[in-house]
Amino acid sequence: MAKVGTYLASVKFHVAFIFLVLPLIWFFGLVACSGEANEDARVFRYNESANLSSLDPAFARTLEPMWVVDQLFDGLVELDNNLRVQPLLAHHFELDSSGLVWTFVLRHDVRFHAVSEVKGLETGRRCEAEDVVYSLNRLRDPKLASSGAWILEAVDENALGGGILALGADTVQITLSSTFPPFLGLMSTAYANIVPQEAVEHFGADFRSHPVGTGPFQLAWWLEDVACVLHRNPLHWERDSAGEALPYLDAVHISFASDMGAEFQGLKQGRFDFMSGLHPAYMNELLDDEGQLNVGYSSELRLETTPFLKTDYIGFFTEEDPEGNWHPGQDAAVRRALSAAIDREAIARNLRRGTVMPTASFVPPILLGNTEVTEPKVQRDWARAVLDSVRKLHPEPWLPLRISTTSDYTDLCAALQYQWGQLGLQIEVDVVSAAAHRDRVATGKAALFRKSWLADYPDAENFLSLFHSANFAPSGPNYTHFSDTEFDAMFALAMATRGADNRQLLYRNMNERLAFSMPVIPLFHDQVTHFVRQEIKGWKVSSVNRLDLREVRKQVQK
């Protein structure tokens, strides 16, 4: 396999060689999965257009590596389909009466992948409390420079063991510096997966391409820019309700084709078993005007969707001009008028094929205890009246409202330009590179900007923290520099509140306060969108868009 990898390192420079070698790699990859005849029924295939940068959970920053990391590793806890935290490697967990100390009691039947070249892991060994301590301390070690170190910021480093302590082989105790109800959700992220110290020290920097965990699959081979193959982990501890060992699949094959059109063709032809998300290359062909799967594909595919913990919005830099100059975007009444004039339903229908949920709420409804999104009404007459009243205080001409965006969202900003133009406002769309856009938003150089926020964990705090005055950008995510003492006070009270219902009431009040001050104009909540071939059974789709292949089966016709 090392020789094959050497040959394939030059694939990008030898096109003819690609077409000769890749079919052989695919063939031998399948043979390695099983000695039986019908390999196709036990190999799940999908394409990843963005490639992979690392298989180390400490660097699982985006969905692409998360999907693979989730197959290779386990954490103490996981989220169920209703976004409730459930035990995984932990048999059970509890929080003490102070709200500061979490105790996790581990399962006894969890083993790491067997790795013959690593001393101590030749046949796999039991995952114990010291492995949890090592993994979490590694995550927050500044020498590693993990992008996930922030999930442990609430841990009290001055407590015994630096706040993360093994109590024997089976129990881990984590002490927080102050009450923080979302902490358990943070432990469900891919960053918090457990790794064995022996493997990390043996492979060093190459642990990124030699991952060892306790997950349902283990790495067979990964040829960067070409493909990645995972094999079933024979030591995996999980069983289904009938006692059958998980996973059902023998292997997972991940291709790296950057052409979205080619990915779509692969799905139609059965070379890929699922495809995630929407792209102009295939959106109009797959979906009808209502955002449903076109009937012509219903025999081959099905559409699986669920609300995504993501909000697209227009943000305003709300700080007053140091020289006292007035800008219309800094006036809350103007912002409310702009929001009321947006036809979100038309934008969702015409630009997003009905696959997003129009909203005037920044926090997704599921995190506020609601099952449905209340669609905002268009109120242009009211908006004109509000602007007329503002004009009496601030006579025109006004500075133009300039929206900073990237090329991916010019259609959305053009729609807003047209709709706001009907109010007699001068709107400009400033299209810049992604890097320039990020810099402008982070440094307050964009008076208006299009942006989206995707939750890392299922708690409304993740959205509301964008407006806490302690989180001003560029050091924090408060890009608007919104500051409100009453909002901050409610935020602090919510973090000190143990009862989920009481905390949710505070969250709703905070969300309503944002709707009045309107430092951002929410546009729509996205959806997780999966196109899955009909022969795939046991598919799960979650609001955090994690990939769960443990109970997936393929029913391939002979």
Image: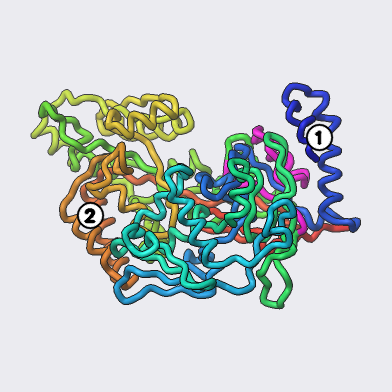
Element type at mark 2: helix
Q: Nearer the viewer, residue 419 or 181?
A: 181
Where does the magenta region start and end?
250-278
Label 2 Cα neighbours within 10 Å, binned few <14 / some 14-19 / many ≥20: some
Residue 310 percent coordinates (x, y): 44, 49
Q: Nearer the viewer, residue 229 or 57?
A: 57
Q: Nearer the viewer, residue 127 or 501?
A: 127
- Residue tagged 2: 513
**Which residue sits at x=22%, y=44%?**
482
Rendered position, 224 above or below 558: above
Residue 14 percent coordinates (x, y): 78, 22
Rendered position, 396 above or below 283: above
Determine if residue 117 is in view: yes
Name the quadrant of the N terminus.
top right
User: Looking at the rendering, which quadrant does residue 534 occupy?
Assistant: bottom right
- With 14 as the anchor, is 328 left or right in this view? left
Q: Amino acid at mark 2?
A: Arg
**Which residue sits at x=32%, y=34%?**
442
- With 13 as the anchor, is 341 left or right in this view? left
Separation of disc 1 and disc 2 at Cα? 62 Å
Q: Amino acid at mark 1?
A: Lys
Determine if residue 301 is in view: no
